Image (spheres, rainbow, N blue to C red):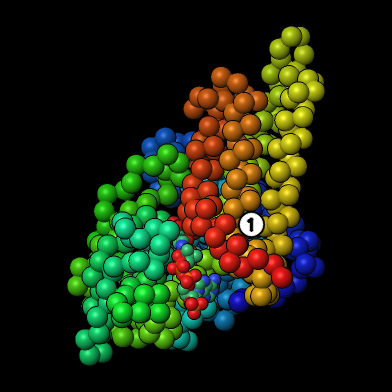
Amino acid sequence: MAGSPDFDLYRPSEEHDMLRDTVRALAEAKIAPYAAEVDENARFPREALDALVAADLQAVHVPEEFGGAGADALATVIVIEEVARVCASSSLIPAVNKLGSLPVILSGSEDLKKKYLAPLAKGEAMFSYCLSEPDAGSDAAGMKTRAVRDGDFWVLNGVKRWITNAGESEYYTVMAVTDPEKRSKGISAFVVEKSDEGVSFGAPEKKLGIKGSPTREVYLDNVRIPADRMIGAEGTGFATAMKTLDHTRITIAAQALGIAQGALDYAKGYVQERKQFGKPIGDFQGVQFMLADMAMKLEAARQLTYAAAAKSERVDADLTFFGAAAKCYASDAAMEITLDAIQLLGGYGYTRDYPVERMMRDAKITQLYEGTNQIQRIVMARNLPK
Ligand code: CAA
């Protein structure tokens, strides 16, 4: 993994705090103003991408030797958290850039790393991750997409579904079956380019939340790619996909933290302004108790997520448990906190004139993607701490 673990277990260093200040200022000035309209019109947050690229924040995880910032896992979490605090859709730019490219970083050849990480680091290309299929969601190893060897080439055929940023990304890590007899051991990973002949995309899904981040099917119709586009050895694609998720489920936890923080900050301000029975509703103990619970859950989720980020950076033996636990706990917390934020705003919270209903809709996806929270519990149960 890139970067150095220059933080003491899970406590952010001074540099991490400075990074947070920088990202928060950028997010408030250049991303927040568009968040409601991006959601309303379900359009890609181009302004956010431009602002992130101008500040070199679109893919901070790329190692320095490949032209990136070489940010550690906690720094990457902080970037995603701060962007998600104002616009969850935009936070999928740095998050999915890490998800899509991590298989190459973890298992790819030097040539693949050089070729595909430099454009990502420069902001010239985004990277998506293609694991799921219409009939292979939780059971990822049940995929049908097939890759068949043909001399110095592989020919890919199949349909990938729920692909975040599909159509916007130039590069796609695609998991495909190379030996149908071997289930998970017969799956290999490849880099596919948007411009490869035979690649096309479905209509954008009409979603409850993260409406600014396009989710589309990716169709692979006799896509013929050079054999050196395989990531790692034949048959290692499923293990690479799972190792990737061990690290990147932490970025979904980060997204959940950011969304929840945004909702809590908004609700905290609102209860000071809103007067009923002759005083701000924040003066009522019932309201104070709700805010206390929200802050308590958020801080517990943050500590678990930062602990998981430290483990990701060190690639600790218990990373699999912690990655799943952070994603599961933080996303459940974000759902509860955003629902409570709506409650604190009353009827106003239920309207699109206020941001908390968007935050609640955005929080919901964090309980679903990169593995449902039921799958996280399977992963945790199979990897209980010793
Ligand atoms: N690290 C390394 N290797 C691993 C691994 C890990 N964490 N987990 C599994 N493997 C390897 C092992 O080598 C294992 O083989 P062995 O028998 O030799 O140990 C092999 O994979 C198969 O593992 P399992 O037997 O555990 O496989 P399974 O079929 O029972 O499935 C699962 C396990 C955890 C349920 C898995 O299918 C899973 O994670 N499902 C959820 C899929 C998911 O998260 N999808 C998200 C899509 S991406 C997304 O949502 C992105 C987005 O839009 C932003």
The image shows residue 157 at horizontal and vertical percentages of 23, 70
Is the residue marked by circle 1 packed among few (<14), some (14-19), or many (20+) residues within 10 Å? Answer: many
Residue found 57% across the figure and 81% down from its top:
65
Badge 1 marks a residue whose secondary structure is helix
Q: Is residue 374 left or right of residue 258?
A: left
Instruction: Name which quarter of the figure residue 186 lies in.
Output: bottom left
Of residues 36 and 377, the one drawn nearer to the viewer in this rendering: 377
Q: Position of residue 193 (x, y in %)?
A: 32, 71
- Is 62 in front, or is 8? 8
- The residue under the point 31% across, 58% down is 135
Expressed as whole percent of the image width and height from the top left, the position of residue 176 reads 33, 73
Which quarter of the rendering shows the N terminus?
bottom right
Q: Between 32 and 200, which is closer to the camera in this rendering?
A: 200
Q: Which residue is depicted at the point 77% across and 67% down?
A: 9
Residue lying at 59% horizontally and 48% vertically, measured from the top left = 331
Residue 122: in sight, yes or no? no
Q: Is residue 148 visible?
A: yes
Quadrant in which the C terminus is drawn: bottom right
Q: Which residue is mark 1?
A: 326
User: Which image quarter: residue 168?
Assistant: bottom left
Farthest top residue? 277
Q: Amino acid at mark 1?
A: Ala
Is 7 placed above or below 137 here? below
Q: Quadrant of residue 325?
A: bottom right
Q: What is the total number of numbered labels drawn onto the structure image?
A: 1
When the figure is inspected, residue 207 is found, relative to residue 369, above or below; the finding is above
Q: Position of residue 382 (x, y in %)?
A: 58, 66
Tell which of 142 and 288 is nearer to you: 142
